[in-house]
């Protein structure tokens, strides 16, 4: 596999993050490689426990240690390998150049600090703002993310904000130092549908204005379709499929992706049972020797249970981890190279 | 809003997504005025005021504190004697009078609590004793706060081996019988001056009283550090020290305040106990414990020498405990529904 490294903001190479548990070593992220160009949006989808969040915590080195440990790999961000940086240096990158938005806005703001203080902390820390500058900047950011009456609301505490507004504050905080990369870890999961749409629109708009690259972690395929340029499908700590978003939806090259796409409710279908992938995600501490998806896969054969599948390249931007990647791809209408 | 003016509007039951969004926005902006001013502290204060015992405690504590601070000066202004004034010019005066009597046995306002064996005004001495008792209690509590909170927060935040070592040290110190330790400390370094003895008392009391505080804060931090806002703070590049002292410690404030209010009477009691045994405050300084200790020697003849300092101390300790309990109820999030 060869990738051009031009224009890549982030390059993750053979990243492995393991957790030591009483049950054995859990390979939460196992040999993952991907890259992200400047200004692009990458979606990472997968079931709970597939390693989406751990991948991104690994990028900014926030995997809880112990029990977690980044075993090997490289995370090259703008030319430097983040995994080799000393603690001070990585702290200067966090928030300044790579910012994160978390899943639950209800718990990711400090309940004892005023909104303004939390926003000001960012720019005072990273941009060396004085109190006055930081406050002005904080209020400008709150206005940008659509908080009405930002000047007075800034002095509220988080519990005086609704969930959607708190997520807006989180976004304001994340973007206040104009980071090059924004990692949004299921930013809309805890919000109701209408607020979800607003938040996603907001991220999209701000991304276009600032040219920030975005990694969007989600398990909502609809969100992926509307927001991203590339998609990574993760399962059991591995990348199962990587493709352009449009292609992934029209010509999936992996049975797991197929299953995911079939599980999306179709509002036009009159009735009938919703499809679901049989079985449960595997216990990552005790993976079978073959393909981790084999026990749930409807087209698994003998070889799938015996041998670990290859990462097959289907075209320039499309890869799939499956013994039958070419077949699946052809069946969905693609022409493998 | 237009919809509210027309309750029979057809679309009322079928709110389209656009309308739902709009309504949500309006509600949040309207909430601005409504929401402001209900902070945690205001809520807690309101709940505290509903608790009659706590209010009683608060009033008594405030009165005793104010009286102790300004009382001795006021007495000096009015009657012209200090708490340690011994009338040496007249041998008739250097003995113990009952309350509200002058040397001739007539009614007088000069000594509302009588005088002690040396003829010092008991009221002034009780107030001065209060000054020292409260001072010892509060200062030792502050010492225990500073040490205990930082120690516990650091142990809890870093966890793992650091936590283990730090907390085992606490366990080891806990297992020492601290009264004996304090007595040994005080008698080993027995100071020549009353002030030196007082400082020694602070050190001795402060060094043992932070242990429980450290445990409480560690427990709080252990549960807080796994909350997402800590991860979010780390993800924004905040340093560990800042996370501990700016993000975590303020979140432990509720339990810490409660425990601190309950530590003050506890330390005052220990101080009284030590002074009673003769290890604490030395004359001419006075604390409630040392006054009681002097008073008990003449209990049968001059009961007021024990009764006044004893009752004042008991009342203050009760009040501090009521206040602490009230604060705990007021600040406990689980009590919020009541």
Image (tube, coloured by chain):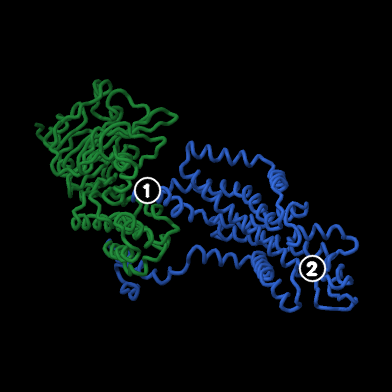
Residue B31 in sight: yes
Quadrant of the rendering where the C terminus of chain B is positioned? bottom right
Q: Quadrant of residue A328?
A: top left
A215 left or right of A332 in image: right
Q: Residue at x 31, y 74 (%)?
A: B2
- Find residue A76 and report its horizontal and vertical position in percent: 23, 39
Whichever of callouts 1 and 2 sits on the residue coming sooner in the sequence is 2
Q: Quadrant of the N terminus of chain B?
A: bottom left
Of the residues tagged 1 and 2, which is closer to the observer? 2
Q: Chain B, which colour?
A: blue
Residue A281 rendering spot, x and y as whole percentages: 34, 34
Chain holding disc 1: B
* Residue at image point 25% right, 58% down: A202
Camera-nearest residue between A234 and A142: A142
Given residues B257 and A237, the one toward you in this image is B257
- Residue B70, percent across and down? 67, 72
- How far apart are the two marked residues, 1 and 2, measured between alpha carbons? 59 Å
Secondary structure state at the residue bearing disc 2: helix
């Amino acid at each position: 596999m060869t990738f051009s490294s031009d224009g890549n903001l982030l390059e993750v190479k053979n990243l492995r993050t393991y957790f030591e548990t009483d049950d054995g070593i859990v390979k939460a992220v196992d040999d993952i490689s991907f890259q992200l160009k400047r200004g692009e949006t990458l979606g990472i989808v997968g079931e709970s426990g597939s390693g989406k969040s751990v991948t991104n915590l690994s990028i900014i080195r926030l995997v809880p240690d112990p029990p977690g440990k980044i075993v090997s790999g490289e995370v090259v961000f703008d030319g430097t390998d983040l995994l080799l940086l000393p603690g001070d240096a990585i702290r200067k990158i966090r928030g300044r150049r790579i910012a994160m938005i978390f899943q639950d806005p209800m718990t990711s703001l400090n309940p004892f600090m005023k909104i303004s203080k939390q926003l000001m902390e960012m720019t005072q820390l990273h941009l060396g703002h004085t109190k006055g500058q930081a406050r002005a900047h904080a209020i400008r950011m709150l206005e940008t993310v659509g908080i009405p009456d930002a000047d007075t609301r800034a002095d509220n505490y988080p519990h005086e904000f609704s969930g959607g507004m708190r997520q807006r504050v989180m976004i304001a905080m994340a973007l206040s130092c104009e980071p090059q990369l924004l990692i949004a870890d299921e930013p809309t999961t805890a919000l109701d549908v209408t607020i979800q749409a607003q938040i996603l629109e907001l991220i999209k708009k701000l991304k276009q204005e600032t040219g920030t690259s975005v990694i969007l972690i989600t398990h909502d395929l609809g969100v992926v379709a509307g927001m991203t340029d590339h998609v990574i499908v993760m399962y059991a700590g591995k990348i199962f499929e990587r493709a352009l978003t449009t292609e992934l939806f029209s010509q999936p090259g992996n049975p797991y992706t197929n299953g995911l796409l079939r599980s999306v409710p179709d509002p036009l279908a009159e009735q009938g049972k919703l499809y679901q992938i049989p079985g449960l995600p595997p216990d990552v501490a005790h993976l079978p020797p073959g393909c981790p998806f084999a026990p749930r896969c409807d087209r698994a054969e003998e070889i799938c249970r015996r041998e670990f599948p290859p990462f097959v390249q289907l075209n320039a931007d499309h890869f799939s981890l499956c013994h039958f990647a070419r077949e699946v791809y052809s069946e969905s209408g693609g022409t493998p190279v | 809003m237009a919809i509210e003016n027309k309750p029979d509007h057809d679309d009322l039951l079928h709110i389209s997504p656009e309308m739902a969004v709009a309504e949500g926005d309006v509600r949040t902006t309207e909430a601005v005025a409504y929401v402001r001013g209900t902070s945690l502290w205001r809520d807690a204060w309101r709940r505290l005021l509903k608790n009659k015992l706590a209010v009683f405690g608060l009033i008594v504590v405030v009165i005793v504190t104010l009286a102790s601070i300004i009382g001795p000066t006021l007495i000096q202004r009015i009657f012209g004697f200090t708490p340690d004034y011994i009338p040496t010019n007249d041998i008739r005066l250097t003995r113990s009078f009952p309350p509200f009597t002058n040397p001739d046995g007539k009614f007088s306002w000069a000594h509302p609590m009588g005088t002690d064996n040396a003829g010092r005004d008991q009221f002034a001495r009780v107030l001065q004793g209060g000054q020292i008792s409260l001072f010892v209690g509060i200062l030792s509590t502050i010492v225990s706060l500073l040490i205990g909170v930082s120690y516990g927060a650091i142990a809890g935040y870093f966890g793992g081996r650091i936590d283990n070592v730090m907390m085992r040290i606490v366990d080891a110190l806990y297992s020492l019988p601290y009264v004996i330790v304090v007595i040994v400390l005080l008698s080993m370094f027995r100071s020549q001056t009353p002030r030196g003895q007082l400082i020694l008392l602070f050190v001795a009391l402060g060094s043992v009283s932070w242990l429980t505080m450290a445990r409480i804060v560690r427990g709080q931090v252990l549960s807080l550090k796994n909350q997402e806002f800590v991860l979010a703070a780390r993800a924004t590049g905040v340093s560990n020290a800042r996370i501990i002292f700016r993000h975590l410690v303020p979140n432990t404030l509720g339990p810490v305040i409660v425990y601190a209010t309950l530590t003050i009477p506890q330390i005052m009691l220990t101080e009284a106990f030590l002074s009673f045994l003769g290890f604490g405050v030395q004359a001419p300084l006075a604390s409630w414990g040392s006054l009681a200790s002097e008073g008990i020697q003449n209990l049968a003849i001059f009961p007021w020498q024990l009764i006044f300092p004893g009752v004042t101390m008991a009342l203050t300790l009760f009040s501090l405990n009521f206040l602490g309990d009230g604060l705990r109820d007021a600040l406990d999030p689980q009590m919020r529904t009541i």
